[in-house]
Image: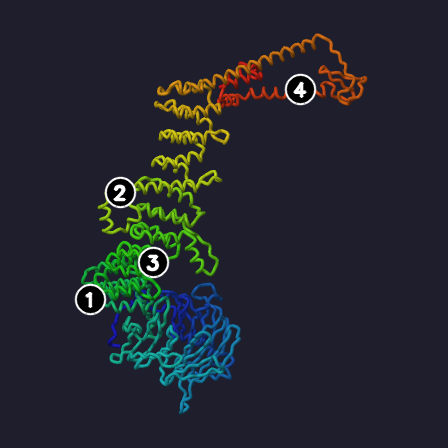
């Protein structure tokens, strides 16, 4: 004990001289604390209650004689007292147990005269339980209202009472502690209940033994734990349900299975107690005979407080303090200092290990513990004990900011300590990306490959670092193998390929790795690194792309899948960007794809891309067949002549144009109105690169015949131009006959001798009567190189044809004039002369005509009954007359449709004939002036 350090972790509370209030006049016999009050029993039978600060609350007469024991219950505000009361009938004192309800008062006139209600009085000794001196007393609150009360007697017996004492529903029985060989009786000096779950036990102490009664069996079984004992007031219970017994040589702890720890604190133990994990002990010093109050911290092996005290009569705990009541009624109140004060005291003495043990034993929060460890680490660091300082800092992980420690150990000489700290950070899961970077840099600077392997390739199933950071640092330090291991294990395919391609140049291995991935992952990696792969391994890369984008790769995956497989093929369009500098490889890829997939959803985009490649004169990039050519290939290229280069380029361009033309035709079948490519784009490409064959095909498919002949005119291909007009200018086959007029205009403005071509064109114009002769003459007159002999025969034939037409028209006019004269004469006769009807038969029924009869001016006669209700028009002539009227109304309606009139004039070969026809039908003659003015 003398080797234990002494500290002042406790201090005197309620400063000033404190005594028992003057209202308490008797000698103190017993005390009890609970529910914020202290109950004091005196030899005059009174019980007084004291508040905080030992202020007198009230007192009452509990017994007629002395109060031996008092106990304040914790669950209910009841006070249990044991004392002597005088029995009038027997005229002697008897031991009585009383229960007072402190919440109920009988005399509420004043606080000093209040008396709680006594709810039950129980005689302790009966005929079955002979009277003996009570030497110890213990109370246990079971589930209310059940109380367990044990009385230890001078004769070695224990009286046990259990039940609801307030209602006298109790059971009594007696326990015998021990029988000595000489049959002498030893008093029971200490009792303590122990409840462990559903098990109820009772410790009993005598001067020569320690026993344990187990109430699980009936009658309760007794077990002797030790053959030594103690005096009265030297027994207590710890918060771990251990019995504490004090003897002059030591303090003993007992559990249910026997003696436990033993602490050799010398001196007679007058009082024992337990307070917040501390052992309280009032010891009489063997040398000086003085009483010393010691507070022992058994876990940390130190004396938390030590002070000389007077003769103590009672020791109890209340209000968070230890209360010592002296025989002279003075009071000493001692309380524990706060944790911060205790730690400051230890820090000033550099007792950091004690401080650490203290905060851990008192179950302080982790932050407080970490702060103590930090200060201890700083202390060791100041003494240059870096290894031990780091061990303390490691314990602060999770509470102390790592940068605080890292800054102290950034010196190269302390890199080993820094490495240990960073490793612990990762093990405990508090490392950030920067910590991972720093740790890996430490490994690389130390060239500690073994630790790097352990850190990177740990097989515990849980990564304790940021993957991307580890890869980046290992890659920067040229530890490519470790970086690739982390990337592959973490599934970071983009990093794995980045190292293979950019750092190691292992293109074949990269392609194998991509082939092993899932289709979705492989597609993502190719999009990112396809440019490098196409540049160095175009053939193999294209094969992988074809497997990804076609059913060939899907068939393999579908065969390896047992369940239902729904293919999700990527589109080749998604990978076009990787071919940005390699158009020939792109052409190869798209050609192979279109050969395998005929109904791709991306056909339009694919065909557009192929057309751009096919129809470009110069792609400004070497073809794919030249990508892997080495030095020998370059030498041969240097030795080739410029003429050979041009010839090869021209041949290659011609082949591409032919591919483009085949694509234009195949992607626009005759049964489809729209092609499977962008027509506008195709036209622009053909125009830009001078691809006439493509333009001719597109214009012809779009029925832009004038643009078709425009291409021939631009090329001065007269033979092709005439052949095109023969094919496209036949109106009988759906062609446009106006092409011949455009062709004639072209030759008229050509400015060179083209007599042969003009004669051939005039033959077709004459055959289909496309243009009037006057227009032909006006058109050809613009070409000074043409002579009259070119059109001589054409004009002669046209004049002869016109003369015949004039003769035909003259004869028709004469005929119409004669008919008109006859009609007018007939009308005059009808108006001026009588009409004789000589028909003898009905025109309808052909029977003899009899009266009543109806005669019409058209010389038809009918029975009246044959006509019915229709007597105003001739049934025979009415249909013809109505058709004429309908035609007339139709002509009048057409006269109002001016757009139709102008369209006919515009589209007719001879507009004058259309106007003449309208005059002849009497349409224009009936048009009002206003309507004419409104015509456009």
**Who is closer to the viewer here, 513 or 723?**
723
The mark lying in front, picked from 4 and 1, is 4
Label ID, residue 385: 1
Decide if residue 82 is on the left or right side of residue 536.
Answer: right
Q: Percent from the top left, x then y, of residue 47?
A: 42, 71
Q: Is residue 784 above or below residue 192?
A: above
Which comes before the other along the chain, label 2 or label 4? 2
Kindly check if marks 4 and 1 are in contact, taking CB atoms under 8 A apart as contact.
no
* 3D distance between C-alphas at marks 1 and 3: 51 Å
Report which quarter residue 283 is drawn in: bottom left
Question: What element does badge 2 sit on?
Answer: helix
**Who is closer to the viewer here, 932 or 595?**
595
- Write the residue at 26% across / 51% down: 629
* 3D distance between C-alphas at marks 3 and 4: 94 Å
Q: Crowding near pointer 3: few (<14 within 10 Å), some, many (20+)?
A: some
> Is there any visible trace of residue 745 in the rendered image?
yes
* 3D distance between C-alphas at marks 2 and 4: 86 Å
Q: Is residue 430 above or below residue 804?
A: below
Residue farthest to the bottom, as pictured? 182
In the picture of the structure, the residue carrying the numbered disc 4 is 881
Which comes before the other along the chain, label 3 or label 4? 3
> Is there any visible trace of residue 393 in the rendered image?
no
């Amino acid at each position: 004990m003398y080797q234990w350090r002494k500290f002042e972790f406790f201090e005197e509370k309620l400063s000033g001289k404190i005594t028992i209030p003057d209202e308490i006049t008797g000698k103190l016999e017993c005390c009890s604390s609970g529910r914020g009050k202290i109950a004091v029993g005196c030899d005059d039978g009174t019980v007084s209650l004291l508040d905080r600060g030992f202020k007198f609350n009230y007192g009452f007469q509990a017994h007629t004689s002395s109060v031996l024991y008092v106990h304040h219950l914790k669950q209910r505000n009841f006070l249990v007292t044991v004392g002597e009361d005088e029995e009038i009938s027997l005229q002697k004192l008897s031991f009585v147990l009383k229960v007072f309800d402190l919440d109920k008062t009988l005399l509420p006139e004043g606080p000093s005269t209040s008396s709680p209600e006594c709810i039950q009085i129980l005689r302790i000794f009966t005929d079955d339980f002979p009277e003996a001196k009570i030497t110890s007393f213990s109370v246990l609150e079971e589930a209310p209202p059940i109380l367990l009360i044990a009385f230890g007697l001078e004769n070695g017996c224990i009286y046990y009472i259990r039940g609801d004492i307030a209602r006298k529903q109790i059971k009594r029985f007696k326990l015998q502690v021990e029988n000595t060989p000489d049959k002498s009786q030893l008093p029971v000096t200490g009792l303590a209940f122990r409840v462990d779950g559903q098990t109820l036990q009772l410790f009993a102490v005598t001067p020569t033994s320690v026993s344990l009664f187990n109430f699980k069996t009936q009658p309760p079984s007794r077990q002797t734990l030790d053959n030594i004992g103690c005096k009265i007031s030297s027994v207590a219970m710890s918060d771990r349900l251990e019995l504490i017994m004090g003897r002059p040589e030591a303090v003993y702890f007992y559990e249910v299975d026997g003696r436990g720890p033993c602490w050799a604190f010398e001196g007679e133990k007058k009082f024992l107690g337990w307070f917040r994990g501390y052992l309280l002990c009032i010891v009489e010093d063997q040398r000086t005979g003085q009483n010393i109050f010691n507070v022992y911290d058994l876990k940390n092996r130190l004396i938390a407080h030590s002070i000389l005290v007077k003769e103590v009569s009672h020791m109890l705990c209340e209000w968070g303090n230890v209360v010592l009541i002296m025989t002279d009624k003075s009071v000493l109140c001692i309380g524990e200092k706060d944790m911060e004060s205790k730690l400051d005291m230890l820090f000033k003495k550099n007792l950091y290990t004690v401080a650490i043990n203290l905060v851990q034993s008192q179950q302080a929060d982790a932050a407080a513990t970490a702060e103590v460890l930090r200060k201890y680490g700083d202390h060791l660091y100041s003494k240059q004990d870096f290894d031990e300082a780091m061990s303390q800092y490691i314990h602060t992980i999770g509470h102390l900011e790592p940068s605080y420690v890292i800054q102290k150990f950034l010196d190269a000489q302390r890199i080993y300590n820094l490495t240990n700290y960073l490793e612990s950070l990762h093990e405990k899961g508090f490392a950030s990306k920067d910590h991972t970077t720093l740790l890996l840099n430490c490994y690389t600077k130390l060239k500690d490959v073994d630790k790097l392997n352990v850190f990177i390739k740990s097989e515990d199933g849980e990564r304790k670092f940021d993957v991307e950071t580890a890869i980046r640092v290992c890659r920067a330090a040229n530890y490519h193998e470790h970086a690739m291991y982390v990337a592959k294990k973490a599934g970071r395919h983009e990093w794995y390929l980045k190292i293979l391609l950019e750092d190691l140049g292992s293109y074949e291995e990269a392609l194998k790795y991509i082939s092993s991935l899932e289709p979705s992952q492989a597609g993502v990696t190719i999009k990112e690194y396809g440019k490098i792969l196409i540049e160095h391994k175009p053939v193999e890369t294209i094969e992988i792309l074809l497997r990804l984008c076609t059913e060939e790769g899907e068939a393999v995956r579908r065969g390896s899948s047992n369940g239902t497989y729904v293919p999700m093929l990527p589109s080749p369009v998604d990978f076009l960007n990787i071919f940005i500098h390699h158009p020939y490889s792109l052409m190869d890829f798209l050609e192979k794809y279109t050969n395998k997939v005929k109904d791709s959803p991306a056909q339009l985009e694919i065909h557009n891309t192929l057309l751009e490649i096919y129809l470009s004169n110069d792609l400004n990039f070497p073809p794919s067949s030249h990508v892997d050519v080495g030095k020998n290939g370059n030498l041969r290229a240097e030795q080739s002549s410029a003429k050979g280069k041009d010839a090869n380029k021209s041949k290659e361009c011609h082949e591409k144009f032919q591919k483009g033309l085949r694509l234009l035709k195949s992607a626009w079948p005759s049964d489809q109105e729209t092609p499977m490519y962008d027509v506008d784009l195709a036209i622009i490409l053909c125009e830009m690169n001078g691809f006439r064959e493509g333009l001719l095909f597109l214009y012809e498919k779009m029925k832009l015949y004038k643009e078709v002949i425009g291409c021939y005119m631009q090329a001065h291909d007269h033979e092709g131009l005439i052949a095109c007009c023969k094919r496209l200018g036949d109106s009988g086959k759906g062609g446009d006959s106006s092409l011949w007029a455009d062709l004639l205009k072209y030759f008229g403005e050509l400015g060179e001798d083209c007599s042969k071509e003009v004669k051939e064109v005039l033959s077709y114009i004459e055959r289909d009567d496309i243009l009037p002769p006057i227009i032909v003459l006006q058109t050809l007159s613009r070409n000074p190189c043409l002579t009259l002999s070119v059109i001589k025969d054409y004009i002669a034939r046209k004049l002869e044809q016109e003369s015949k037409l004039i003769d035909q028209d003259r004869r028709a006019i004469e005929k119409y004039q004669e008919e008109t004269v006859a009609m007018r004469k007939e009308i005059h006769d009808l108006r001026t002369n009588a009409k004789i009807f000589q028909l003898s038969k009905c025109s309808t029924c052909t029977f003899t005509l009899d009266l009543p009869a109806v005669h019409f001016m058209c010389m038809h006669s009918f029975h009246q009954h044959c006509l019915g209700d229709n007597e105003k028009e001739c049934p025979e002539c009415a249909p013809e007359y109505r058709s004429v009227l309908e035609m007339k109304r139709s002509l009048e309606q057409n006269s109002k449709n001016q757009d139709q009139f102008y369209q006919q004039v515009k589209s007719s070969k001879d507009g004058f004939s259309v106007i003449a026809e309208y005059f002849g039908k009497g349409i224009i003659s009936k048009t009002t002036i206003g309507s004419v003015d409104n015509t456009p």
